[in-house]
Image (cartoon, rainbow, N blue to C red):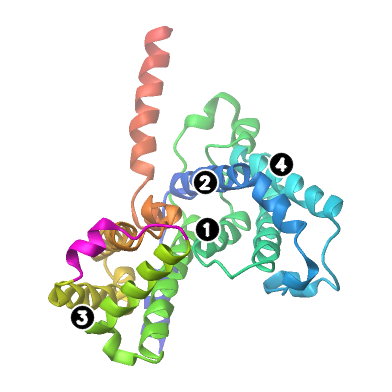
Amino acid sequence: MKSILQKLASFWFRPIAPERLSILRLITGGFSLWYLLARYEMFQKIAQSELSLYDPVGLATLLSEPLSFPVFKGLLLLTIGLNILYILGWKFRFTGPLFALSLMLLMCYRNSWSMIYHNYNGLVMHVMVIGFTAAADTLSIDAWRQKGTKWLEEVKPDWQYGWPILLICTLTVITYVLAGFAKIYGDLAWDWMSGEAMRSQVAVDAIRKNLFGSQASPLFEWIYPHTSLFLMMGIMTMILELGAPLALLNQKIGYIWALLTCSMHWGIYFIMGIHFPYQMGGFIFLAFFPLERLWFMARTRLIKAKLIAQ
């Protein structure tokens, strides 16, 4: 029993450089800010929809009734403001959790007015983890205010930076495992992997697009006669989704799984035209990679440039 606990402790509380967590803060914050600003008008239109379309989900179920438009717009602007402070790492002890909660509420409220979109759940979960941890100890205004000119100095790896990153990796893996379970516990069960079943599912999506004024992917029309290709894609999808936990056991396996799964999303995009920006951009998988090395190289150049300038 003691051996098992020691292995769990060494897994969850392994020391990792704080710069990786800070870089994840910057990337998730930058992505969420882009998303909120790009969909600013859309958010406002949704909040003014017919009341009959309102079906609260998640945190929105805590509301007794839909928010008035001025209150919703205030929430939207507050979230954008907190998003900027989250990126800057200013008074992160307070602004981090506040942004994580406001983003969660905003996204739940957005999904309460239409179909439930799951493509940004990974982003929201990552922000929730980062917002409540020590993600601003480096590369932030807080670090600069505390250390002054020494804010560029390396901070030793520590377990308090390691467990949030491992939790982010674990949450990412769980989302794919759940997607795999949804397939095998659905109507088709394991037959979902068969070329015919998968081809029919994609064909229905293509017909729907054509009927509602969109356009099916030319690539799908080209591969439609080749059932064997759909069989291989179905098998690979199930391997990547149900085999996702293996990515947590070995660093190299994690790299390979992340790259293949990112490629799977690009395949979905080219065949079905379904766009998952957070996944296709690889952002959802970045916690698996030693991002701090990029900062170390950049910092070395900054220090050399500073010495030359002096």
Which residue matches tag 2? 31
Q: Which one is closest to the eye, mark 3 or mark 1?
A: 3
What is the quadrant of residue 268 in the picture?
bottom left
113 in magenta: no
Report the amino acid beneath label 2.
Answer: Phe
Which residue matches tag 3? 195
Residue 198: % across, % down:
28, 79
Label 1: how many Cα within 10 Å (few below 14, some 14–19, many 20+)? many
The CA distance from mark 3 to mark 2 is: 36 Å
What SS does tag 4 mark? helix
Quadrant of the image containing the N terminus: bottom left
Q: Nearer the viewer, residue 167 or 281?
A: 281
The CA distance from mark 3 to mark 1 is: 32 Å
Q: Which one is closest to the eye, mark 4 or mark 3?
A: 3
Q: Is residue 297 above or below residue 67?
A: above
- In screen coordinates, is 62 left or right of 155? right
The CA distance from mark 1 to mark 4 is: 18 Å
Whether tag 2 and tag 1 are in contact, CB under 8 A, the answer is: yes
Which residue matches tag 4? 81
- Sequence-wise first label, 3 or 1: 1
- Seen at 48% across and 50% down, the residue is 21
What SS does tag 1 mark? helix
What is the quadrant of residue 191 in the picture?
bottom left
Whether tag 4 and tag 2 are in contact, CB under 8 A, the answer is: no
